[in-house]
Structure formats: C-alpha cells, structure tokens
Image: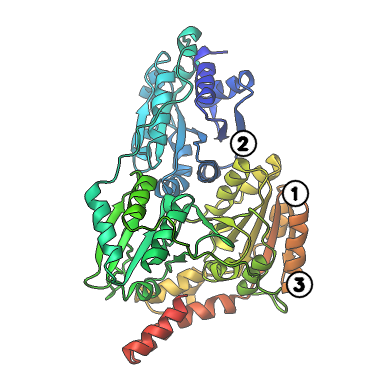
Amino acid sequence: MPAAARALLRTLVDAGVEVCFTNPGTSEMHFVAALDAEPRMRAVLTLFEGVATGAADGYARMSGRPAATLLHLGCGLGNGLANLHNARKARVPLLNIVGDHAAGHAQYDTPLQSDIETVARNVSGWLRRSASSARLCDDALEALAAARSAPGQVATLILPADVSWGEVAEAAEAGRPRAPAPAPAPAVSEDLVREAARALGAGRRAALLLGGRALREPALGLAARIAARTGTRLLGEVFPARMQRGAGLPVVERLAYLPELAAVQLAELDEIVLLDAREPVSFFAYPGKPARLLPPGCRVCALAEPGCDLHEALERLARKLDAGSAAPLLQAAARPPLPRGALTARKVCQALGHLLPEEAIVVDEAQTSGVMLPAFTAGAPAHDLLALTGGAIGQGLPLALGAAVACPGRPVIALVGDGAAMYTPQALWSMAREGARVIAVVFNNRAYSILELELQRVGAGRARGRAREQFDLARPQLDFVRLAEGMGVSARRAATAPEFVAALEHALAHPGPHLIEAVVPRAYAGLKLRLLPRLLDALDRLPPGVARAVKRGVAS
C-alpha cells in the first residue's frame, strides 16, 4: 500500500478529522485502499457529490469540526459545487479533497481532464494542489488550519494520483502535530464596543441582529441579557446556519424571506447592531424596490464581523451596559393542538410543533413550510434549526445526513419541497446504509410554487400556458414513497392530518431513516403566494399607521 495515502489518512485522523463523505473514482483509489489501514476514519459513501458536500456541511454545523469530502476530478467537484456554495455561506470548516490525474498524464488532455483550480476557487477560502508525496501531510495540515480559521471556511486540497501513490517516509509523518492550531480570532476594537453601547443605551429604537455563532449559546444568552437590559429587539438572520431555539431559550424574531415583510420588521429602527451578521438586504433585485431593507436614517454598527472574537466582545458590551445580571426574555413551553382534517402545509407544521421531541435537529429547506414552522415550534422543546444558508436548493436531505452522522443520538427531521428533494434524492440511500436517524418530510404539492410568486414579483406577469408548465411537477406525478423504498428507506404517504400524525409518531418511535410524503394541495400552497403581492400593494393604500400594524402582523 502506498505510504503517502496511508500517511495522509493518519495525519487527518490524528488532527481530528474522523469522517469522510466520499464519491471516489480511479484517481482516488489509493486513498480508498488506505482506509483499510486506518479504522479510525469513518468513510460514508454517497452516490452523488452534492450529497457528499452537503453532508459535510451538516456534520460541521452540528459538530463544530470539519469532515472531509473525497471527490473525483473537476467533474465530481462540479457536481458538488451547489452545496459547497451553501457551506461557504454557512461559514463552516470543511476539508474538500479532490483527486486529479497524475501530473504526467495531464498533457494528454484525456476526457476527464479539466482546470480544477478554476472550478474550486469560487467556493474555497483556501486552495492548493499538492505537488509531492513528501509535502502531502504538511499540505493537509495547512488545509485543516485554514478550514478551522475563524469563522470557518472551505479548504480544497487537490490530490494528484501520483502524489497519493508515492512513497514517503513514515518516520517523517509520525512526528507531526496531532491538530493544527488555527489563528486566534481577532478581538473587536474598544471603539466598536463603545459605539454599540451608545447605540443600545441611548433610548432610541434599536435592535440586535444575530447571525452565525450569535444564534447559539453562550453568545445567544449574552445577547438576550443585553436586549433585556436595554429594551432592544432581538432579530435573527433569515437563513441561519444553526440556530438554537425552543422552550427555555431566548426569544429571537427571524427576519422574513420576503423583503416587503422584512422591511416592515425593520421599519421603525433608529439603530441596529450586527453580531456575526451582515446588513439585511433583499435576496434578489425587484423592479422599483430598494435592495437595502433598513429605513432611511437607521445607523448600523457592525460590532462583530464574522471571524472576530464574538463572545469576548459581547462580554465587554454587557459590562458596559451593566447587563450581566439582567433576566433575558425566554420562550415559554407551549404546544399547538394536533391538527385534524385534510392535510395542508400549515397542519404539517402544527403536528411538528405538537410532537417535536427533545434535542431534535430540524433541517428546513421547504418554502412550503418555512413561513409557518417558526410559530408552531417556538414553544416546543429546545432544538436546533439548520437552514438553507446559500439559497441553492437540494441541500436539505444531505444536510440531514451529515447532522445525523455528527449527532447519532439525536432525531433529525428534514423538511423539503418536492422539487428540492429531487436534486439530491441519493441521500436517502446513504441514510439507509448508515442507519441514520432521519425523518424526511417531503411536501408534495406538485409545483415549484415559490417560483410562481417570484414571477409576479419581478414584474414578469402571471404564468400561463407554457410558462406555467415550468413550475408544474404533476406530469408525471412524483412518487416519493416508492422512491424511498427503492433505496431502503421506510416510507409512508399522508393526505390527511391524522395520517401524517400517525406516520410521524411511527417514525419517531422506530430509529432509522423514514420518509413521509406529505401530499398538500397545490391550490393551498399557491393561493397564499399569489395573493401576497396584491395584499401588500393594497395595504400601501391604507393610512401609514394602519398599514404598518397590519403588515407587522403578516410578517410575524
């Protein structure tokens, strides 16, 4: 067995990388063979590279540690790019290992030859091609240090086949450090802390906007104490990488996805302090609509940029505001009643709120559920929420797989739309193979309903005829039960609320992967979306005070 590949695996495991999500090819066979010599590395096979990259993201979000991916050449990397984009936006540590042809083979421009560096550069905060077997372990350690550098990033190491199969002295590798030490997070300047204290303590209408690490303890608790002491609102970013919420945790109001509603939430602010978050802007450009969502005159204080020492900055801010002993506003325990009647997306969320178990991990990728889920699960037992950070759909199922590998003792519930589920259905096979404790809820409304709304919002009119067919998933109908069962996952279909409740109760009681196909009417999903732009336009014709009050209710 080539010493270089064996040394690489030993170096990774000694440095704390215990899981590799793989989709290997010929160029990676020496890495694969070396797995037999390193039983400490768990290799999770995936059938599509987008599953490997999305799962590595989910693993990092829940463990705080990088997993590795193993991808085959530039084409394999290309297949995984969408979820590497999401991982980059989530700012997670991830080691991306991409095999390549042997150096001497590149001159022949074979069918799989490509410019891997160009493909990788867009999603990689650190990028290197390993040039020799002797340097391979050093390259791996530098890649890990880069991935772990605050706040976390994708580090891509290109591994040519001849570097992997080369010989390297074991003695040289054995003396390497067990874990690369990332650079310490830079401290926030005293001037910024003083500016934030002024903004929050001046008696003006202010908010703390939380993102990244600020949505998790211990930073979350500190932020809540500061908000309680100063009478400040606590807001959360639209798509958090990981948010701790539920009974007993601080109450945080997430910003709405629709910019019209987010602007209502932000409308009366005089000051906003950003904690590991960026200024809120519209997800897309819309004709005649502003991209910036803050009201004119609202002052922005970026207290802790991503990568800064957030916790230390919050401690200093709390001392300046005498907030250390303040009692934060915590979410009371509450459960909605079980739903009845025909199934709708709303009733799915209601059932989840009633049945959500302790320490659940909820992966929410479905636009069908995203609007209603926060309200129904606010008082459920404390849980983690993982969202679609980069907007590239097809992340939900792989993210759930990675979270389940990272936290095998916790139930994972993934909420995905029918269209998004078809991007990476191969994740179901890996869930079955690994015995992952995942319940995948697929909202089957036979449509890309969100795109019907977006068509109107960009000013392109309503969908008719051939245009409407671009959003229609009913011809032919997707059968997610048969799809899941064909990959070894137990599955049920639910068209009524009692059927869904029974399916969810069964899945929660029986460990292992399950899929529930929630059949919800397209009319329900689409009707609310089609009416929303008209509702907002109508509200703009009301007196300003009345319009603001009604819009705030819609936003919440």
The mark tally for this picture is 3
Residue 251 falls left or right of residue 206: right
Real-space Cα separation, disc 1 to disc 2, in angstroms: 21 Å
User: Pointer 1: what residue?
Assistant: 511
Residue 395 falls left or right of residue 44: left
User: Pointer 3: what residue?
Assistant: 498
Whether residue 349 appears in this view of the structure is yes
Label 1 vs 3, first from the N-terminus: 3
| Nearest-to-viewer mark from 1 and 2 | 1
Q: Is residue 237 above or below residue 24?
A: below
Identified by mark 2, the residue type is Leu
Q: Nearer the viewer, residue 209 or 241?
A: 209
> Where does the image place residue 236, in percent across and percent down from the top left?
43, 62
Real-space Cα separation, disc 1 to disc 3, in angstroms: 21 Å
**How packed is label 2: few (under 14 Cα within 10 Å), some, or many (20 or more)?**
many
Q: Nearer the viewer, residue 213 or 390?
A: 213
> Where does the image place residue 533, in percent across and percent down from the top left?
41, 81
Q: Is residue 133 above or below residue 49?
A: above
Q: Is residue 63 above or below residue 285?
A: above
Query: Label 1's element?
Result: loop
Identified by mark 3, the residue type is Pro
Q: Nearer the viewer, residue 184 or 322?
A: 322
Q: On residue 45, which mark appears?
A: 2
The image quarter containing residue 51 is top right
Tell me what residue is drawn at x 50 percent, y 61 percent: 250
Label pair 2/3, CB-CB below 8 angstroms:
no
Label 1 vs 2, first from the N-terminus: 2
Query: Label 3's element?
Result: helix
Q: Is residue 248 above or below residue 178?
A: below
Query: Label 2's element?
Result: strand
Label pair 1/2, CB-CB below 8 angstroms:
no
Whether residue 533 appears in this view of the structure is no
